[in-house]
Image (cartoon, helix red, strand yellow):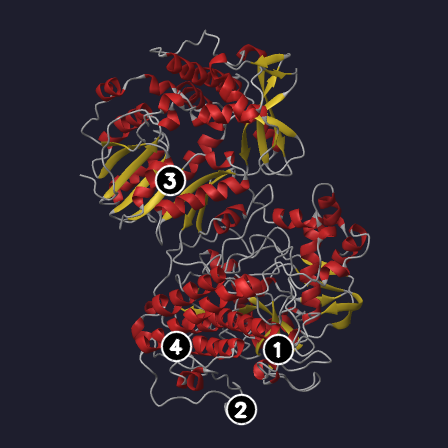
């Protein structure tokens, strides 16, 4: 018996959604008799029962054909050219499946060989991700050449695994299962007949771990929004935390290779595509025969809508988008003939029941095949609310399998993809094309975070405090300069409640003493521990965890009520600012707590998601530099957010709040400079320490606390290996991708490296100018302009040429709208990722140190609502000794709202060794 899903074996009947398919010509009785499931596997039919009025209703597939042919539509993903369309589903009847199987053996069709290469080469690293006593669910009936590679490894190395294959047609399921099931005695086999929607929801109730397989490259048939919706739908309907999806993706490559693959010399691909017309004819013939009460369809009757011989297959490859489009082109003027029996229904659908004329050369769109660039998988995973945790490629780098895992929580709602590809710059380029329509003064986020935004942040906090940190460790204090974890459990709701009480002019939530104990934490000067800003009194004994959690829930309920009322009635600008402060404070303290957690013993940390680290496959990235002209009167800071001038005013739609240190705007002049395209990596920093050690120079105080030594007893410094601290494991710098991650260090350590290399750290103004100008320039560099950007003398010079009215207005907007989609912020990953190798990367992975002491802009006014936020940490005037320095950018744990707001200023003590902060180098030109 298979008990891992909620299912019942149902009577085998033809579902409404498949009416007209060739398989449905059998009666339910004959179907039952002709496919008697062998004892090696179970067969479960989930297909929906036909309704009593089935013969009166037009099948959905018939409606889609009529609607697609009578409507001109843009190609998926955006195109100015409109076409008539046919459903891609028409390609995959029995005849189409047989033709496609022949295609996979063609020498031009590289995909199958590449996929087999991936599966054979990386079998072990794939199977290790699939636990014992789990379910493997394949979308499709399973390929003998591909699926059995994984099944063979699972059969030998795993126990208690059940393999499920899902398909809408019973016979291919039986054919596949009869071939596969007898070969693997240690794997249970179940065939599930039905659509994905009909089947997958039954897995949601399962307590077993699940791995969904979507092999091949069928995801390429979807436009970007469709791919996101499909994968998110699988996640929502079938997966729970830590379940995974393995997805095959064809990579972008030379156009001639792709064109050859879809235009083979034997013409089998053309035959496959044209078979869609024959299938459409069969569907209409079946439907009309059914209406007439005939026992079987007649393909020679007048109910056939296409003259197949009057069409040819045509295809084209859009290199900019990375997509091959397939069409059925009329060889001569012809008609699509609607059967008279459905004339009334056709007229109801499209307003005309007359035959549809097609002119010679007119094309009907049938399918697309998107190709994926580097970083595209991460963008897709994030857009679907998942995390990209593993990638395996073939030896030619033509094809990849990717593993997406469902996280226990996400920090924000998944971003919306509006562009035509998952290239990391596509979304930015999409916005850049509308640059003249952008109002720099209006936020791209709601002024007040919405209730779903709050709920995402709350869920993320709970994952960190109540799962990653074991309950027994909540009173631990891994960093002496900070309170124990239990303080932060109360601090975040207490701070929020103080501001909510001010926002709605109501008393504090009980117990009110929590506001006194938890309002403000400690952050002493690490060079003189007697110096510390004012903070809350520390109770003799911290309250019990359950008492604090109950208090937290009351505060959260208070916010929910306020947000609901705000949606109906609005709020004063003062109340709105209080609520905004509470949100960003909570998001910022997530990072504080995270870097504290990273200083725990790795064995005490409970990983939120299973993660594998790729082996170190190559050298450190080639060092590349980007030039900037700089200029005078460059504008930095936030405009229009004077807390005092806005008192009593109505809250303007699209207003952008900022902390007091972000205002007022200031003007700074910059001399020409060059900045390194990538931050310094763990591998580079380790080489620096080894070079110092080899020359007998001291490395005292230079080894990052983001590392753990595996050979601490060695008499020779730096002799052993180091691993990097994360909440999902400790990958080795010497043998894994962690060597390519940005190194997290203190500013003192960063300065030591810069001095050794003969360079310096960027100023705050240099870093901001470099980041925002590069992102905009790269977003504009599409098509022919991509080559111009590669040859330009400076990034800001390129912008001056591209933007007729100059780039400054768009660069001064509060939010950077042109950040690449693969930026590792907002918990897109629970650890850093390798630095970019295809250009620059300025945002994500870790904050970046600057050489600018933390001090105010001219005209600074401390916030009346939170006067100590900045002022308590400002350093003396710049030419004196400084303690705190500005960091810019954002880490993998920075909320998207904060990371994208380019006016935001963060700061840390220069010697503070715990923070998620890296650095890059600058040289003067």
Q: Which of 299 and 525 is in front in this view?
A: 299
Callout 2: few (<14), some (14-19), or many (20+) C-alpha neighbours within 10 Å?
few
Choose top left, top right, bottom left or bottom right for residue 593.
Answer: bottom left
Mark nearer the N terminus (1 vs 4): 4
Q: Nearer the viewer, residue 455 or 103?
A: 455
- In the visual, does 515 lie left or right of 23? right
Q: Return the residue at label 2.
A: 531
Callout 3: few (<14), some (14-19), or many (20+) C-alpha neighbours within 10 Å?
many
Distance from disc 1 to disc 4, alpha carbons, whole Å, reads 26 Å
Q: What element carries label 3?
A: strand
Mark nearer the N terminus (2 vs 3): 3
Q: Which of marks 3 and 1 is in front?
A: 3
Q: What element carries label 4?
A: helix
Q: Nearer the viewer, mark 1 or mark 4?
A: 4
Q: Return the residue at label 3.
A: 213
Mark nearer the N terminus (1 vs 2): 2
The quarter of the rendered structure image containing the C terminus is bottom right
Distance from disc 3 to disc 1, alpha carbons, whole Å, reads 48 Å
Instruction: Look at 63% across and 83% down and name the residue there.
Output: 874
Q: Return the residue at label 4.
A: 485
Choose top left, top right, bottom left or bottom right for residue 162.
Answer: top left
Q: Return the residue at label 1.
A: 885
Q: Where is residue 802 in the image (x, y as percent from the top left)?
A: 78, 50
Mark nearer the N terminus (4 vs 2): 4
| Residue 680, visible in the rendered structure | no
Instruction: Check contact, mark 4 vs mark 2: CB within 8 A.
Output: no
Q: Where is residue 361 in the image (x, y as percent from the top left)?
A: 66, 18
Distance from disc 1 to disc 2, alpha carbons, whole Å, reads 17 Å
- In the visual, does 772 lie left or right of 176? right
Q: Which of 172 and 761 is in front in this view?
A: 172
Q: Is residue 97 above or below residue 572?
A: above
Q: Which of 312 and 704 is in front in this view?
A: 312
């Amino acid at each position: 018996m298979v008990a891992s899903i909620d299912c019942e074996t149902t009577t085998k009947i033809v579902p409404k959604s498949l009416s007209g398919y060739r398989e449905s010509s059998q009666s339910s009785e004959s179907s039952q008799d002709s496919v008697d499931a062998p004892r090696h596997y179970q067969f479960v039919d989930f297909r929906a029962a036909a309704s009593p009025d089935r013969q009166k209703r037009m099948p959905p597939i018939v409606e889609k054909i009529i609607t697609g042919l009578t409507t001109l539509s843009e190609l998926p993903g955006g195109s100015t050219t409109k076409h008539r369309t046919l459903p891609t589903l028409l390609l995959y009847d029995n005849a189409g499946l047989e033709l496609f199987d022949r295609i996979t053996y063609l020498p031009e069709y590289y995909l199958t060989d590449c996929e087999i290469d991936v599966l054979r080469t990386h079998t072990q690293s794939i199977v290790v991700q699939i636990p014992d006593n789990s379910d493997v669910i394949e979308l499709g009936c399973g390929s003998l050449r591909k699926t059995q590679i994984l099944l063979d490894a699972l059969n030998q190395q795993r126990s208690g695994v059940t393999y499920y294959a899902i398909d809408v047609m019973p016979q291919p399921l039986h054919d596949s299962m009869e071939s596969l099931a007898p070969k693997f005695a240690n794997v249970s086999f179940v065939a599930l007949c039905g659509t994905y929607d009909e089947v997958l929801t039954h897995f949601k109730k399962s307590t077993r771990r699940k791995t969904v397989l979507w092999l091949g490259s069928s995801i390429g048939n979807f436009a970007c929004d469709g791919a996101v919706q499909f994968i998110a739908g699988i996640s929502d309907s079938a997966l729970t935390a830590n379940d995974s999806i393995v997805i095959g993706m064809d990579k972008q490559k030379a156009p001639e290779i792709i064109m050859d693959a879809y235009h083979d010399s034997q013409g089998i691909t053309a035959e496959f595509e044209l078979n869609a017309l024959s299938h459409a004819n069969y569907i209409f013939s079946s439907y009309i025969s059914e209406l007439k009460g005939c026992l079987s369809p007649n393909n020679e009757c007048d109910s056939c809508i296409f003259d197949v011989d009057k069409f040819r297959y045509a295809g084209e490859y859009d290199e900019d988008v990375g997509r091959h489009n397939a069409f059925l082109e009329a060889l001569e003027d012809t008609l699509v003939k609607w059967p008279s029996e459905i004339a009334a229904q056709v007229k109801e659908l499209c307003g005309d029941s007359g035959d549809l004329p097609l002119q010679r050369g007119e094309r009907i769109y049938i399918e697309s095949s998107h190709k994926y660039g580097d970083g595209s998988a991460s963008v897709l995973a994030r857009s679907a609310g998942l995390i990209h945790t593993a990638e395996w490629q073939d030896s030619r780098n033509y094809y990849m399998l990717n593993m997406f895992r469902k996280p226990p929580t996400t920090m924000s709602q998944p971003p919306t993809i509006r562009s035509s590809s998952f290239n990391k710059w596509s979304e930015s380029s999409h916005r850049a094309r509308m640059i003249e329509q952008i109002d720099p003064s209006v936020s791209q986020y709601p002024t007040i975070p919405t209730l779903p935004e709050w709920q995402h942040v709350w869920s993320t906090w709970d994952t960190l405090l109540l799962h990653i940190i074991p309950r027994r460790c909540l009173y631990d204090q891994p960093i002496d300069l900070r309170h124990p974890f239990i303080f932060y459990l109360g601090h975040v709701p207490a701070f929020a409640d103080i501001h909510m009480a001010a926002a709605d002019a109501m008393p504090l939530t009980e117990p009110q003493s929590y506001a006194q104990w938890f309002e403000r934490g400690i952050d002493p000067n690490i060079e003189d521990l007697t110096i510390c800003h004012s903070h809350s009194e520390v109770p003799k004994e911290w309250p019990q965890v359950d008492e604090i959690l109950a208090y937290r829930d009351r505060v959260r309920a208070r916010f929910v009520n306020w947000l609901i009322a705000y949606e109906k009635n609005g709020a004063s600008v003062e109340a709105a600012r209080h609520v905004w402060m509470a949100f960003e404070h909570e998001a910022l303290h997530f990072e504080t707590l995270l870097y504290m957690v990273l200083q725990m013993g790795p064995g005490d940390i409970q990983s939120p998601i299973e993660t594998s680290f790729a082996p170190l496959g190559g050298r450190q990235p080639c060092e590349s530099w980007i030039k900037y002209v700089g200029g005078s009167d460059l504008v930095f800071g936030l405009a229009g957010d004077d807390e005092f001038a806005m008192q009593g005013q109505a809250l303007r739609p699209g207003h952008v709040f900022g902390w007091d240190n972000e205002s007022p705007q200031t003007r700074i002049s910059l001399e020409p400079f060059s900045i390194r395209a990538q931050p310094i990596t763990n591998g580079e920093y380790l080489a620096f320490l080894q070079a110092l050690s080899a020359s007998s120079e001291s490395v005292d105080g230079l080894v990052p606390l983001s590392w753990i030594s595996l050979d601490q007893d060695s008499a020779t410094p730096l002799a052993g290996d180091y691993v990097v601290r994360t909440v999902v494991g400790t990958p080795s710098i010497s043998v894994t991708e962690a060597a390519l991650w940005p190194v997290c260090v203190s500013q003192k350590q960063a300065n030591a490296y810069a001095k050794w290399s003969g360079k310096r750290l960027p100023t705050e103004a240099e870093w901001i100018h470099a980041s925002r100008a590069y992102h905009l320039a790269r977003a504009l560099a599409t098509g022919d302009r991509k080559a111009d950007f590669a040859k330009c003398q400076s990034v800001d010079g390129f912008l001056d040429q591209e933007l007729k009215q100059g780039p400054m207005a768009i660069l001064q907007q509060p939010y950077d709208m042109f950040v690449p989609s693969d930026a590792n912020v907002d918990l897109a990953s629970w650890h850093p990722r390798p630095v970019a190798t295809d250009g620059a990367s300025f945002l994500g992975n870790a904050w970046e140190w600057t050489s600018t002491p933390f001090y105010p802009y001219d005209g600074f006014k401390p916030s009346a609502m939170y006067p100590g936020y900045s002022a308590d940490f400002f350093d003396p005037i710049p030419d004196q000794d400084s303690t705190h320095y500005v960091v810019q950018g954002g880490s993998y744990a920075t909320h998207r709202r904060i990371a994208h707001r380019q006016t935001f200023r963060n700061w840390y003590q220069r010697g503070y060794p715990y923070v998620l902060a890296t650095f890059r180098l600058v040289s003067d030109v």
